[in-house]
Image: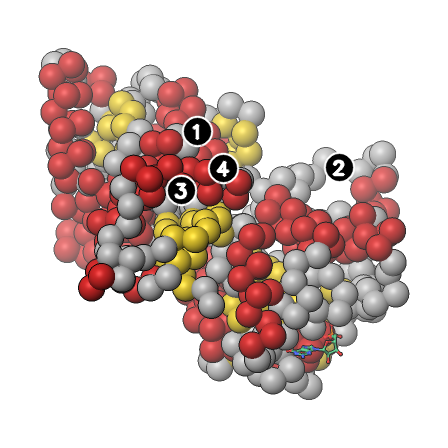
Amino acid sequence: MSFTLAIVGRPNVGKSTLFNRLVGKRLALVDDQPGVTRDLREGAARLADLRFTVVDTAGLEEVTDDSLQGRMRRLTERAVDMADICLFMVDARVGITPSDLVFADILRKRSAHVILAANKAEGKAADAGVIEAYSLGLGEPIRMSAEHGEGLNDLYSVLMPLADQYAERAGDDAPETDVDLTEDEAEDPDAVPVPTNAKPLQVAVVGRPNAGKSTLINQIMGEDRLLTGPEAGITRDAISLRTEWNGVPMRIFDTAGMRKKAKVQEKLEKLSVSDGLRAVKFAEVVVVLLDAEIPFEQQDLRIADLAEREGRAVIIAVNKWDIEDERQAKLKSLKESFERLLPQLRGAPLITVSAKTGRGLDRLHEAIMRAYDVWNRRISTAQLNRWLAGMMEAHPPPAPQGKRIKLRYMTQAKTRPPGFVVMCSHPDKVPESYSRYLVNGLRVDFDMPGTPIRLWMRGQN
Ligand code: GDP
Ligand code: GDP
């Protein structure tokens, strides 16, 4: 089992060209299969050593702009919901059009993984369009020419880590139904209720063995676990549980189940780390669960650092608070350790809980929702540039070797986590300390605690 990639975008940007390149002759038309919309084309794709399924929203050439809101939107949504990863293609020669914005919006709302590709980017004529693509807020665009086969290496390097993750995930949620309704079913009043298309918030609970992960998840799941939990004795690599927690659909990655396989202590430690690692990759929000008695152990620090590097929203939850009696003093020392040992997670919430009694779980829920919100935060380009001007006035960028660095323009390139691009002269000369100054400023001025913030310096001709 592998993953499914949907190629989406407005007509004429080059989707079919890329589709054909990836699929070659290995095309499998899905038209005749019941329940599959005719307008989606599916093929077995190959890119270097990667094998995956690619879906193309073909046959949209005749669609006029008027029906963009209708048919095209539905079709795209369907492709997005079928796919694990979406490749959103724009035309770098034309630049960003209003239709592109409609697509970007759909993707932002519905897809966990979006790869942005600026196609037709062979030659200099496309430079402006590639830069403009940053403004979609979907990350750094891959510069591509589907027709000439350029940019496929970059596509490969973006897909590869995701492919790993989906390969491992395959089958982990077999008992669940993520069924996309066909329209007929959707209108059938007698249809059995099925899960909505709203993507559940993906949460991983990680931490060392015995921190209380299973207890916490059981407490969150309540009765639900009996319905959705994996059968006893199951030894899947990552177990995910679907639930609603305080009304919010969530998918919780349980990293505890794994250790039941382990026989010896050494193996146990190892498994627990790699299993946690996998859960982190799946998650949007990572809860690092510490044991109040032995907080911030090496293993905790490693997984928290990993979560930050993977760009996840992170929450530190200190468990077994029920057996703590010097709470004030303990909390103070925990906060000190946190700041000293995990400076890269500055401002992340630290919540005390008792998985056993359920105390503090509402606060944990709140912290998850808030972290998720910050992680998705979007700041307008106008606001950013006003802010950047102020920052430069307060502290002008340095002038290495007498050459003043000019920061020209700033925009948010992505969310989840927030990432920003600063267009400047001599991007490679901007010192780390100045980038840090900007990142810390963003964190404070736009109220973004506890989320990783990415900043890229880029040159512009
Ligand atoms: P779709 O409607 O998005 O599937 O777009 P197509 O794949 O049918 O491509 C639309 C037009 O753009 C065709 O004439 C292609 O030959 C052309 N095209 C596709 N990729 C490229 C490219 O990388 N560079 C240039 N210059 N043209 C391209
Ligand atoms: P896991 O290995 O992280 O899944 O940890 P478990 O959930 O299996 O818990 C390990 C041990 O800690 C068990 O004996 C639990 O009963 C205990 N435990 C878990 N949470 C709490 C808590 O909030 N308070 C107390 N006192 N014990 C807890």
- Asked if the residues shown at circle 2 and circle 4 are in contact, with their CB atoms under 8 angstroms apart, the answer is no
364 lies left or right of 107: left
Helix, strand or loop under label 1: helix
- What is the spatial separation of the Cα atoms under label 4 and label 3, in whole angstroms? 9 Å
Q: Amino acid at mark 3?
A: Leu
Q: Which residue is mark 3?
A: 388
Q: Which residue is mark 2?
A: 192
Q: Which residue is mark 1?
A: 370
Residue in the foreground of this view, choosing between 333 and 61: 61
Query: In the rendering, at what x and y percent does residue 320 appear?
Result: 23, 24
- What is the spatial separation of the Cα atoms under label 3 and label 2, in whole angstroms? 53 Å
Quick one: label 1, few (<14), some, or many (20+) residues within 10 Å? some
Query: In the rendering, at what x and y percent does residue 157 appear?
Result: 43, 71
Dot placed on the residue nearer the N-terminal end, 3 or 2: 2
Helix, strand or loop under label 4: helix
Mark closer to the observer (3, 1): 3
Q: Amino acid at mark 2?
A: Val
